[in-house]
Amino acid sequence: MEPRLTLADCLRHHLRLTGTHVGCEHGVCGACTVIVDGAAVRSCLMLAVQAEGAEVVTVEGLSNDADLTPLQKSFRRHHALQCGFCTPGMITTAHALLSEEPDCDAARVREVLSGNLCRCTGYIPIVEAVLDARAAYQPKGRDRSGDRA
Amino acid sequence: MRTVNSLIGSPIERLEDLRFLRGRGQYVDDLARKDMLHAAILRSSVAHGRIRSIAVAAARALPGVHSVITAKDIGNRVPRVPMRLQPLPDFEPFGQPVIAETKVRYVGEAIAVVLAETAAIAEDALGLIEVEIEPLPAVADRRASAQDASLLFEDKGTNLAIKFRAVRGDAAAAFADAPYVRRESFRTQRHMALPLEPRGLLAEWDAARGRLTLSGGAKVLFFNRRTLAKQMGLPESAIEIVENDVGGGFGARGEFYPEDFLIPFAARHTGRPVKWTEDRREHLMCVNHAREAECDVEIACKRDGTILALRGHAYVDVGAYMRTNGAVGARNVAQFMSGPYRIPHIDVDVALQLTNKTPVGTYRGPGRFETDFFRERLLDMVAQDLGLDRVEFRRRNLVSQREMPYQIATITPFESKDEFDSGDYQTTLDRCLDEIKWTEKSKLAGKLIDGRYHGLALGCFIEGGAAGPKESARIVLEPDGLYSVYVGSSAIGQGLETAFAQIAADALEVTIDRIRGVFHGSTCYVDDGYGAYHSRSVVMGGSAMLDAAKNLREAIRAQAAQRLGCQPSEVEIVEGSKAVGPGGKSIALNGLSSEGISAEGAFLNKKHTYTYGAHAAHVAVDAKLGHVELVDYVVVEDCGRIINPLTVHGQAIGSVVQGLGGAMMEHLVYDQEGQLLTGSLADYLIPTASDFPNIRAIVMGDHPSPINPLGAKGAGEGGIIAAGGVMANAVANALSAFGAQPRELPLTPTRVWELAQAPRK
Ligand code: FES
Ligand code: FES
């Protein structure tokens, strides 16, 4: 593996995990966001060799064939995606956020998502979808809001 | 459980989402082929100059480089990018060569293509190409362009590509006896569509069969195939253009760009599959720009606020070449300056000026965003002059329902007449006022509350859709009894598959799970398709689908009649699954034919649909920082019969936020040398999740279009069109104590701060 290979290109072109998208290659759009050892990271700004020994989770790793996850269902219900290009980065970012802060409020969701560009939706449905998915991330026994997902 | 015929109008969750949410969409850069070469393109760093030499030997010698292509390798005549819309002979001399031959005319113009074993090697090799360019004075704006001191095309002797003129009635006479006239100048800035997915192409040449497959198409596959066939000397039937999932279009993606020739040419040249993906910097310099327009306009009114006439001159900076749809925005600036208002006398011309900048094309609401800003600003100024209420002034002049169809200004040289089809423009205005609580909030207008000035504004718009001439569809009853739908429209992220499945299922009287799939995005599905532009997909493709469904049902009845031994007219199709003849004798459709039954349909159309509506904004402006907070924003539109309220609503919100980007921040800045200063997303700002949290969209479907069987109208652009004018009027209203009159966009903090520098009244 060439040392200059980015993690994004490694995932996409070497491992053929094309769910991770590349929209800018300079760290602004967030389409390439993956989860490295629990933290949301821009894979276009990280070299593949830096990920040695780390656990990397992509949108594929947050999905299963049988059914959509509660977070994905919430995105679908709120029409939080149009062209779908930003979606993997939104899902990974939102998953990392909700895993850490299942009680975050709208302002916090907006703040965290402000590092991910979407040109289609105007963000409003994405923020709603993330807020609506919080219930699924509550520690067991604390589910107060009645998850509709 | 849903029964049949109830899908149109239901908020059906999208079928597309299932793959997108799992990271299983397939965009063009996701494709890979064995033995594929990667292309990288050397682009001009000089805005205007003569090419003296291009030395490629060092690049060619780099290990891993397969070849380097320049104009010399293309053949005797380098093909030009054609005009797709308004292909007037006047534009021909200004066509863009697909690769620079003797001159470069903008920063970003392609000079050489490197083909290598990896994308990284191809990019490395770009640095080894030596190009000598003798610089010429750059034409950096429309004023310099009009002076003709430095010419982009010397043999033409002018930088003026063409002038259009929009005329209705007799403006000169109306101005001669007008009791009140106001003259103003306005300007909108260059910005662009910026879909999130960069462009890409994958070309495969099958030498044995003489066939080309090009993946990465979008929007107008059939036009692009026709163009490419001509340029490559191939029959159209030898080319298939495939549309993969597309990460946003907004008018820009999918037009025929120079790379749409260069990459297929490279595949044939090398005999290997060739893939190219642009980076964001290339995207910002190469994909169609838009919206750079100025005007000097005059309006004439009676003292009671009845508008009598509108006239003036507009100027559009079209960049270095006229390509595909580069004239549409300018035409619309002139033709739609009157918007949804009754203006009996109009005379507006628009000059298309060439400059050494990226060529322009359409961006969602082309020309309409610009001209709405001009007009709605002007209307607020007039209302202020005449002491009229801003709402009543607009209401008095909106085209009324009984004037429909309403003839608008005719544009020359096309002589194209056009009319508004239907609607009640007052109702969307009323609803918008209600929603934003206009009366209540009016009390805040211009007030300083907690350190910020509050402002309120509204504006009305009209959105054209449903461009003809035609769309095609084909529906197949498969041997297993399911239906496959094929259509010539294109999907660019609008949720087309779902909307079309709804329409087809209703027309076939089946549930949506009986639709096996909606297939679009390949030139091999239907004979002749037209694609996705001018908000046309649902109206045109959907109407074609109704025709195909009718024809298919007839074909099914005919086949079933043979088997049941009766007349086709005696056969009834029940729930799309069985055919029932006289006496209750029936046959299941999945047993009807072993090859399946197929029927085609088409919809031909010369007219346009007009969606309409109103926007209102409430802002709070920090006069010291120039910061504008959007407290509330409402858009109300009526887009005829609604197929899927969920997706239409999503389009409206997304469209507004793009419009707010254009109103408040987006700007492609050039210096006087013609250098683009905003070549990354750190410099070219677009809205983020924290910028505009308070937006509401109300989509009404009360007035179906009379010009198509669905009753649908084009939708998706209405949210963007009025945003610039409304935001500028809201800021003007907030800063009225300073006499602020924004005449230029975007309303960046610096500009807003400047507006608040006058002494307070
Ligand atoms: S591709 Fe990594 S942030 Fe845009
Ligand atoms: S859905 Fe298209 S960029 Fe977000």
Image (cartoon, grey):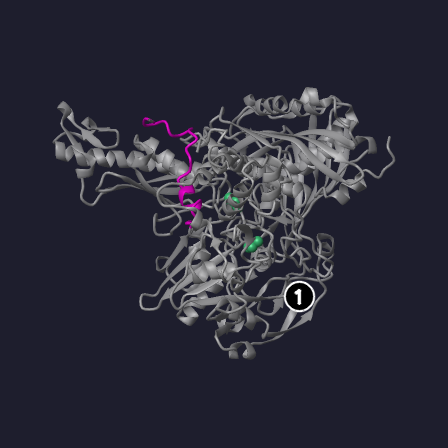
Q: Nearer the viewer, residue B338 or B512?
A: B512
Identify which amino acid the numbered label 1 is placed on.
Answer: Val
Chain bearing tag 1 is: B
Q: Main secondary structure of the magenta part?
A: loop
Residue B529 location, x and y as percent? 40, 47
* Quadrant of the image containing the C terminus of chain B: top right
Residue B519 location, x and y as percent? 36, 45
Left or right of B671 in this view: A51:
left
Instruction: Give the residues drawn in magenta, as a range.
Output: B2-25
Image height of B618 relative to B33, above or below: above
Magenta stretch: residue B685 in it?
Answer: no
Image height of B202 relative to B508, above or below: below
- Give the labeled residue for mark 1: B46
Q: Nearer the viewer, residue B659 or A24?
A: A24
Image height of A56 relative to B616, above or below: below
Residue B391 location, x and y as percent? 68, 24
Left or right of B138 in this view: B476:
left
Identify the residue shown where x is 63% and y is 58%: B320
